[in-house]
Each structure stands twice: as structure tokens, then as C-alpha cells.
Amino acid sequence: MPIQRPKGTQDLLPGTIEQWQYLEETIRTVCRAYGYEEIRTPIFEATELFQRGVGQTTDIVKKEMYTFLDKGDRSMTLRPELTASVCRAYVENKLYGQPQPVKLYYMGPMFRYERPQSGRFRQFHQFGIEVLGADQPVVDAEVISLVWNLYQRLGLTQLEVHVNSVGCPTCRAKHRKQLQEFLTPRQNELCNDCRERFERNPLRILDCKNPTCQAVTSGAPTTHDTLCEDCSTHFERVLVLLGLAGVVYRVNPRLVRGLDYYTKTAFEVMVEEIGAQSAICGGGRYDGLVEEIGGPPTPGIGFAMGLERVLAALQVQNQLPEQKPKLFAMLIALGEKAQNEGFSLLSTLRAQGISVSMDLLGRSLKTQLKAANRLGAQYALILGETELEQNLLLIRDLTLGEQIEVPLVEAVEEIKKKYQRGV
Ligand code: HAM
């Protein structure tokens, strides 16, 4: 049996990778426009970072981490998300000593041992941002408007932006108590997961997709019922600013996120068309996280989006740009002498940044022309024995079927001219 890739992972091959590159380039452009800088942190971290950062009661830490002992018997974990890592890097590299806030973005693979299904992978890719060192509502609005503007630029529609405030630890404790009191008489009706959540993390029951749990929790106290004045004022201000930024959103008082670190603003973006795993982006404020992992008290806010899901949404909405031909020209050199001449021409053209390929299998003219067409080349540069004797190069336009002959000494200039006209 040939070896297969692990369940829940993907090979991203040419033909698809161009879509990824397009998405990644658009993301970088938007991040630059908003003044964010890239950060890259390790693929694995000490397990304790996620236990403390993401939270012991979360699904991620309880069931989904790829954890292993390294040869030095240290417990390591493949990163399931990047917020905790970015906060660790902020503390470890003393970024709090730089002008605040620090505005960072990242893109890369994350790992969660989840049940694979459409839109849910064990290795998936996130683009995310984190802003550290600013607690004003205007930051929350900037972060959400960045998401909104990126999706506008990509041409995504049918977006549902849900916004909520989960409050500070004081509001949360009050809400937790009220929720437990409300749910106590109907505890037995909850699904197994929620019965377990009742003690450890009752807020998550509000988020359960099980219809019975949803029925039980309808009418349950929401986070809004217990917001303190500070959290409430903060949230109202965020909503006003979102309106000014043109973000179309819905306040969803039942939105609680699956990670423990959130305070105040929480948000998610959904595209129903892509199926059950419709959340393409999730984030919020986490004002206690940096301190939790050993740094100075520092407010923070950010989000992450699943790139596989954003691409799925672009695909169903027909918003992926047509792929441009990758190869500008195919050099067809027939015979050893022509190959020598062609090989040096190829090097000169490539050094100028022009994408040219050449047959590597010693095939006939006809087969090479077919290959050039299949690769989407715009031109064939033909160098046969006759051309070589006369010091000429045949340039054939593969779309129009026309061809011209140019003296070999002028070939580079001529090809360059055509290339520049095309770009
Ligand atoms: P999260 O909600 O766990 O948040 O993940 C964010 C996004 O990553 C999801 O909305 C989804 O698009 C994508 N995603 C998550 N799990 C999978 C999976 N198994 N397969 C495919 N896509 C997936 C976080 O990770 C937080 N760190 C976000 C954040 C940053 N909050 C503040 N700053």
C-alpha cells in the first residue's frame, strides 16, 4: 500500500495553489493598508502555553491538541491557534517596551485533532491579526472593519457579521451564576457535552448546536443582562464606530466564543453557503491574556480566519479570479547545437525575470508545441537547424498562430518588448 497523507490534511497542488497565493497577496495588501506588520512564531510551543492561554476547559485543550514529548521529555504541542503564541512572543521579546499598540498579523498552518469533515481539517491555515497594548473601542472597530474591508475587496457577499460583548471577568462571573440558576431545573435535558460544561464552562452551553440544548437555553440570561457600566459603554461605542465604518453587523447576545480568554467584544463572520462549518472568521478582545501568561497587564484584541473556508466561500460565490497563463514562452530547440544556443538564451531571459521553459525530454517539435499550449505559454521560441544556420529565431504567437523571424542577436530585445507589452 502506498503511504497516504494523514487524515484531515491536504496537498495543495499547482492549479489550486494560485488561489492561495491570490488570497495571501490580497491579505498582505490589506494588512499593509492598515499598518500591520507580520510576525512568525514556532510551529510548536510548550504545551503549558496553550493550557494557560487557551484555557483548560476548552475543547481545544481538552481534546484537540497534538501533544508529544520531545527527546528531552518536555511536553510540546503543535500550535492549535496563534493568539497565545503571539502574546508569548510579545512578552518574551519585550515588545511592550516599543511604542504601543503593537499591530501584528500572521498566516500559517494550525493543528487540531478534530473529526474531519467538509471545511474542518486537522491541519488548516489561518490568517489572523493581534493588536496589543490598546484598550479603546476604536481598536475593536478597526479590527472588525479590517475583516469587513478584506471581504469586500475579495468580493464576498452574504456575510453575516455577529458581534457581542461577553463582558469582563466580573460580568462573566455574574452571568455564569445566573445561567446556572436558570439551567439547574432542566440540566437533565442537556446533551452530554453540555452537562459536562454546566460546572466547568456553562457559557458554552449557549453556543451548542444541539436543537434540544438550544430549546432549553432559549430565554436564558444572555451576557447583556449582566454587563457592567464600563463594558456596556465600551460595547455601545464599538457599535457606533462600526456603523461609521460601514460594517453591516448584527448584535448576537448568544455569541460566546470557544476559547476562554475573551473579554468584552467578541465577533464571528459566517457564510451559510459553505455548509455546516460556516464560520470563516472569529475573534475578540482578550484583556487578561498577556498577564495570564506572565507578562505585564496588557489589553489585546484580534481575530483569525480559516483560509480553507474563505477560499470555499470565494469558490461558491464565483469570486476567484481567472488564472493567468503562468509561462510566457516555451523554447523549442531541436538538436544539440540548437540546444546549446537555446540554453544560453534561456539563461539571459530568465535573468531578466521572463518565465521561459524548455523541453527537458528531447521530444519532437510537434510534441513540444502541444506541451507549450498545455502550459498556457503565449509564445514558442523555435530554434531548429535551419534557423541556427541562418542565425535566426522563430517567434510564434500561440494564441494568434502568427510567427516572425528575428536575428538571434536581437532575440532578447524583441522578446523583452513583447513581454513588457503583456505585463
Ligand atoms: P477560532 O474560532 O478557534 O479562533 O478559529 C478561527 C477560525 O479558524 C474559525 O472561524 C475557522 O474559520 C478556522 N478554523 C478553526 N478550526 C478549523 C478547522 N479545524 N478546520 C478549518 N478551519 C478552522 C481562534 O483560533 C482565535 N485564536 C482567534 C483570535 C485571534 N481571537 C483573538 N485573536
Image (spheres, grey):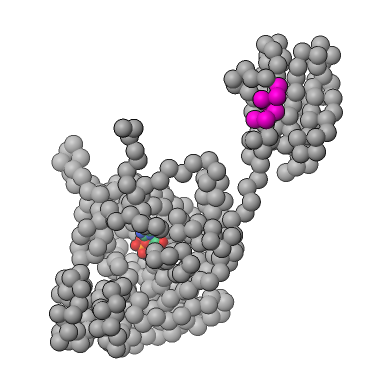
Check the image and report above or below for 221 versus 42. below
Residue stretch in magenta: 365-371
Write the residue at 63% across / 47% down. 323
Ligand 1 sits in quadrant: bottom left
The x, y position of residue 307, in whole percent, is: 46, 56
Classified by dominant secondary structure, the portion drawn in magenta counts as helix
Check the image and report above or below for 148 versus 396. below
Figure quadrant of the C terminus: top right
Residue 144 relative to residue 200: left or right: right
The x, y position of residue 170, in whole percent, is: 24, 81
Query: Does the image show residue 121?
Result: yes
Write the residue at 41% across / 52% down. 125
The x, y position of residue 379, in whole percent, is: 74, 33
Write the residue at 14% across / 80% down. 188
Query: Does the image show residue 131?
Result: no
How many numbered tags mark residues here?
0
Residue 405 relative to residue 264: left or right: right
Between residue 364 and residue 324, name the one nearer to us. Answer: 364
Instruction: Indicate the quadrant where residue 228 lies.
Output: bottom left
Instruction: Indicate the quadrant where residue 207 lies.
Output: bottom left
The x, y position of residue 390, in whole percent, is: 84, 14
Write the residue at 56% across / 63% down. 317
